[in-house]
Image (spheres, grey):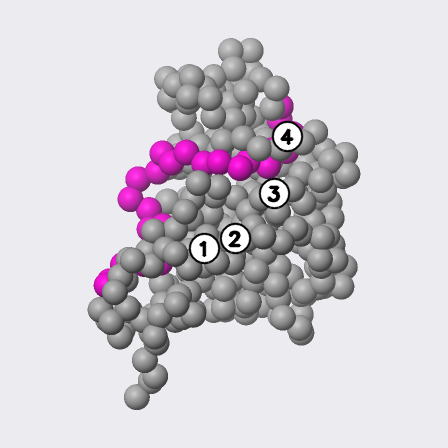
Amino acid sequence: MSAVRIGVIGGSGLYGMTGLEVTEERKIETPFGDPSDPYVLGELDGTPVAFLARHGQGHRILPSELNFRANIYGFKVLGVEWLISVSAVGSMKLEYRPTDIVVPDQFFDRTRNRADTFFGNGLVAHVSLARPICPSLQALFYDAAQKAGASAHNGGTYLCMEGPQFSTRAESEIYRQWGVDVIGMTNLQEAKLAREAEICYATLAMVTDYDCWHESEEDVSVDAVLEILRANAAMGQSVIRRTVARLAAGDAEPGCGCREALAMALITDRAAVPAATAKRLALIAGKYIEVPEDD
């Protein structure tokens, strides 16, 4: 099949792509370990797409156990330039109702000790995350959601918590005071690593519940989340297909800057980069550093 420029990460409730004509399942080895699952490669309405189930088939991997680096690195191996992420989130605002879609443009980190950079071991990089979501992909996502008939909200802050437990009520109330819009457990590390890999990234956040702050709603539970996910699965698939079609047609606006994120980010003296590190990160930073040839 031709080059795969578009990747999709499916979260809770989205373990496959309706309409994807599968050509192969490819297991990819990375310097950072194994991705969550083999990548499912195929064509969606004639466009090559790579799909990965974030938590693995059967939903067997905790948010804290996810190998985010391997997942993003695997998409880089495949040549992915546009990465679409879909995930379930809780709403922190009354106007964001279950079954609504939010396309966030900011993150707030409440995770602990997750590996979220490709760098280290003698090579230091500081990428900008002032705008952690690709604005071009965000615009396409929001437009696709509107045209699909979703109750969609453009922009907002995604608070990424550690999990796997849901919030306490005290936490939920404090997060609301901070002004965040939705809460989830997975997307921040993906956004950070996609930026380091110079891949355009955006999140389709599917609202399933009101966390536990809403006095007149039941506290969030797995059963309630899954019920909403099933009800909203068709809408999510429709938004993805519309977005993929727009990307294939070249409708994404240029100039987002995601593809040059490392250009001014590497701070280490190039002569001081260890050879082993340079080889390990050749796929990520090879156009900015000298990579020794294999003996």
Q: What type is the residue that disc 1 sits on?
A: Ala
Q: Residues within 10 Å of mark 2 (few under 14, many from 20)?
A: some
Compared with 55, 39 (above or below) is below
Residue interval drawn in magenta: 97-122
Q: Which residue is pictured at 51% across the width and 11% down the height?
A: 215
Q: Secondary structure at mark 2?
A: loop
* Residue 250 location, quadrant: bottom right
Q: Which residue is mark 4?
A: 153
Q: Which residue is mark 2?
A: 257
Residues marked 2 and 1 touching at CB (< 8 Å): yes
Observer-nearest residue: 154 or 36? 154
Compared with 98, 11 (above or below) is below
Tell me the quadrant of the picture where the N terminus can be found.
bottom right
Label at residue 261: 1
Q: x and y percent of residue 178 in the render?
A: 42, 21
Q: Which residue is pictured at 37% across the width and 44% down the height?
A: 64
Question: Marks 4/1: CA distance?
Answer: 27 Å
Observer-nearest residue: 111 or 258? 258
Q: Give the overall secondary structure of the magenta segment.
A: loop
